[in-house]
Amino acid sequence: MATAALKEILPPSLTSVSEQPPLFDGTTRLYTSYTCPFAQRVWITRNYKGLQEKIKLVAIDLGDRPAWYKEKVYPENKVPSLEHNGKVIGESLDLIKYVDANFEGPSLVPSDPAKKEFGKKLVSEVDSVTRELYSALKGDAIQQTSSVFDSLENALGKFDDGPFFLGQFSWVDIAYIPFIERFQVVLADVFKHDITEGRPKLRAWIEEVNKIDAYARTRTDPKEIVELFKKRFLPQQ
């Protein structure tokens, strides 16, 4: 299992007064945010494949973004984006596949046709799953998220050769885990609800993903997650 060998010293987040790093100088850069779940997907991918020396992190302060990021690097003005081979590309799910296909390290897509097909299905559904979770915060959060977590529990039972969605750790786990753990933290803290209660496969999955160093080192402090969610989604709290 791929893990980060040494503790990585994370660079500070760049703000509106920060100078722009050189562009297209041959360095591969992952423009990210340490608190963004979308960017976290690509950060996990980079770590798991052991690319800490090959892909440099450039953290952007999303609350005080440098103007040069939109003007000169990535017109979409969001993270993640990847500077590689003279171009900048974005979209987290696309970047998981791009990094997996274009860099060395353990593959994140299984060769087994059944697993590959099921993996594509799950990843195609992840955006609707996350939208459903976020929208549930406006209503009865516990009841409205229940069906989502039940479906994940069922999906985790598809293959029995490991605790992950496709048995072994894959791009599917990377696509889902940043969001599921955020909701686990928020529902536990704000709503006093344990999403893994009665869902042993979901509990085991979260526990096993947290044993993967490449993921664990990308986790946001739970207190910060709760404060961000309260500020953005739960003004009534």
Image (cartoon, rainbow, N blue to C red):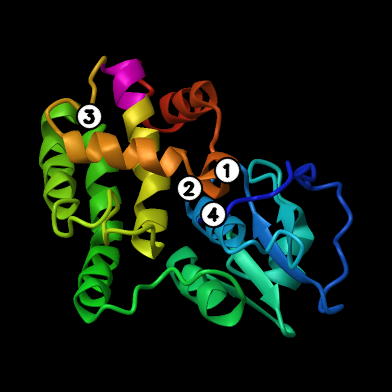
Query: What is the x, y in percent for residue 173?
Result: 36, 55
Which of the two labelled residues, at mark 2 and mark 3, occupies the earlier sequence position? 2
Instruction: Say what amino acid the circle numbered 4 marks.
Output: Ile
Please identify the residue farthest to the bottom as the structure is shown. 86
Task: Please tell me whether the stretch drawn in magenta is mainly helix, strand or loop.
Answer: helix
Instruction: Say what amino acid the circle numbered 1 marks.
Output: Thr
Residue position for label 1: 218
Which is more toward the observer, 132 or 176? 176
Extent of the magenta region: 186-191
Is residue 221 shown in magenta? no
Residue position for label 3: 195
Distance between mark 3 and mark 1 Cα atoms: 21 Å
Residue 88, compared with residue 53, is above or below; it is: below
Residue 32 occupies which quadrant of the picture?
A: bottom right
Which of the two labelled residues, at mark 2 and mark 4, occupies the earlier sequence position? 2
Residue position for label 2: 37
Distance between mark 4 and mark 3 Cα atoms: 23 Å
Q: Secondary structure at mark 2?
A: helix
Q: Secondary structure at mark 4?
A: helix
Residue 113 occupies which quadrant of the picture?
A: bottom left
Which of the two labelled residues, at mark 1 and mark 4, occupies the earlier sequence position? 4
Query: What is the x, y in percent for residue 37?
Result: 48, 47
Instruction: Say what amino acid the circle numbered 2 marks.
Output: Pro
Which of the two labelled residues, at mark 2 and mark 1, occupies the earlier sequence position? 2
Left or right: residue 138 compared with residue 236: left
Query: What is the x, y in percent for residue 24?
Result: 81, 79
Distance between mark 2 and mark 4 Cα atoms: 10 Å
Left or right: residue 164 compared with residue 23: left
Q: Residue at x 25, y 42 (%)?
A: 133
Residue position for label 4: 44
